[in-house]
Image: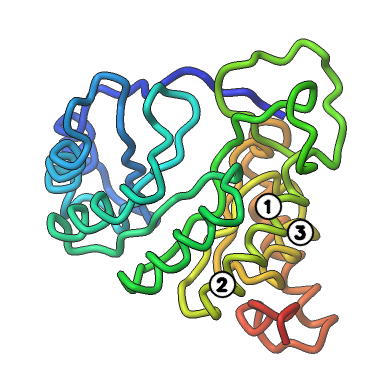
C-alpha cells in the first residue's frame, strides 16, 4: 500500500500544456484536475485549467475527491458545477472521480447527477482518507496493512482497497443502470483484480500503486490475463464481460 500526502506538485497548467504540445503523443493522455488548497473559486479555476489544456489531452477528469490536499474532497452537491464548467471549456470527454468514502446517500446523489448530466464517465474510486486503526465501520480493509506506522493524513491506496472498490463499482453500475461508463480503480494488482472490476461494471481499469511494486510490465500481464479470463467465461471479447455480474 501507499499513503500519498504530497499535495498537488505541478508547475501549473500553462507549463504542462506547453510541454504536451512539444511532445510527440504515443498514447492516450488525460488531465486530472482538482481544487488546490489556496483556491478561492474552484469553478473559475477549473474553467481556466481545462481551457488551457484543451487540445493537449484526450480526456479530462474532474477530481472532486482528492484527500491529499486541503479542500480537495468536494461536497457531492457541488460536483455538478465543476463538471459543467469543465465541459464548457473543453472539446474532449469529461469524467468525474469520486471518493471510496461516500456513504449510501452520497452515492445515490452522485449517480443521479451522472445520469442527469449524461456524464462521459465515472472514475470509481479515489484513494481513501480512512485508516484501519480508526475506521472499522463500515468495513473497508479486507487485507491487513503490514506496517503499524501509517500517517493519518493523505490518501491510502493499494491492495487493501480492492474488495471495497469492486463493491463500489458494482453499486454505481447498478445505480446508473449501466448507462454511465465506469473506470474502476483502487487496489488493482493482478488480472484477477481487474477482471473482477470489469464483471462488476467497469469499462476501463486503472492502476497506480501496483506499478510502484511490480513495474510497468504489469500492464501487459493484466491485459493478457484479461483475455484468458474472458475466454474462459465464454466471452468473445473482454468488453463483453462488462457488468456480467449483473446479468
> Which residue corresponds to the image point at 83% horizontal and 26% vertical from the top-left?
145
Going by the picture, which residue comes out furthest to the top?
149
> What residue is at 25 percent from the left and 22 percent from the top?
11
Cα distance between the residues tagged 2 and 1: 15 Å
Where 94 falls versus 149 (above or below)? below
Numbered mark located on residue 191 in the image: 3
**What residue is pinned by disc 2?**
175
Q: Are marks 1 and 3 in contact (CB under 8 Å)?
A: no
Q: Quadrant of residue 1?
A: top right
Q: Return the residue nearer the eye: 227 or 63.
A: 63
N-term mark: 3 or 2 = 2
Which residue: 18% across, 40% down?
Answer: 49
Disc 1 or disc 3, which is closer to the eye? 1
State the image quarter where residue 157 is shown.
top right
Q: Residue at x 72, y 15 (%)?
A: 150
Q: Position of residue 4 (x, y in %)?
A: 56, 23
The x and y percentages for residue 242 are: 64, 77
Real-space Cα separation, disc 3 to disc 2, in angstroms: 26 Å
Q: Nearer the viewer, mark 2 or mark 1?
A: 2
Amino acid at each position: 500500500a501507499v499513503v500519498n500526502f504530497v499535495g498537488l506538485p505541478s508547475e501549473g497548467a500553462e507549463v504542462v500544456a506547453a510541454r504536451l504540445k512539444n511532445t510527440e503523443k504515443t498514447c492516450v493522455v488525460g488531465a486530472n484536475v482538482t481544487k488546490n488548497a489556496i483556491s478561492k473559486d474552484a469553478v473559475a479555476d477549473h474553467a481556466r485549467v481545462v481551457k488551457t489544456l484543451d487540445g493537449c489531452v484526450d480526456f479530462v477528469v474532474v477530481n472532486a475527491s482528492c484527500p491529499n490536499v486541503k479542500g480537495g474532497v468536494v461536497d457531492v452537491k457541488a460536483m455538478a458545477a465543476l463538471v459543467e464548467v469543465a465541459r464548457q471549456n473543453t472539446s474532449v470527454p469529461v469524467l468525474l472521480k469520486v471518493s471510496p468514502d461516500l456513504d449510501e446517500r452520497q452515492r445515490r446523489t452522485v449517480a443521479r447527477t451522472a445520469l442527469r448530466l449524461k456524464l462521459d464517465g465515472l472514475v470509481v474510486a479515489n484513494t481513501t482518507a480512512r485508516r484501519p486503526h480508526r475506521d472499522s465501520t463500515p468495513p473497508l480493509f479486507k487485507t491487513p496493512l503490514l506496517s503499524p506506522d501509517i500517517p493519518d493524513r493523505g490518501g491510502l491506496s493499494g491492495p487493501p482497497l480492492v474488495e471495497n472498490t469492486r463493491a463500489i463499482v458494482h453499486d454505481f453500475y447498478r445505480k446508473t443502470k449501466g448507462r454511465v461508463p465506469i473506470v474502476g480503480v483502487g487496489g488493482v494488482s493482478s488480472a484477477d483484480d481487474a477482471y473482477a472490476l470489469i464483471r462488476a461494471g467497469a469499462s476501463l481499469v486503472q492502476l497506480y500503486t501496483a506499478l510502484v511494486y511490480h513495474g510497468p510490465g504489469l500492464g501487459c500481464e493484466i491485459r493478457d490475463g484479461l483475455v484468458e479470463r474472458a475466454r474462459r467465461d465464454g466471452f468473445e471479447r473482454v468488453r463483453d464481460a462488462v457488468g456480467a455480474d449483473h446479468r
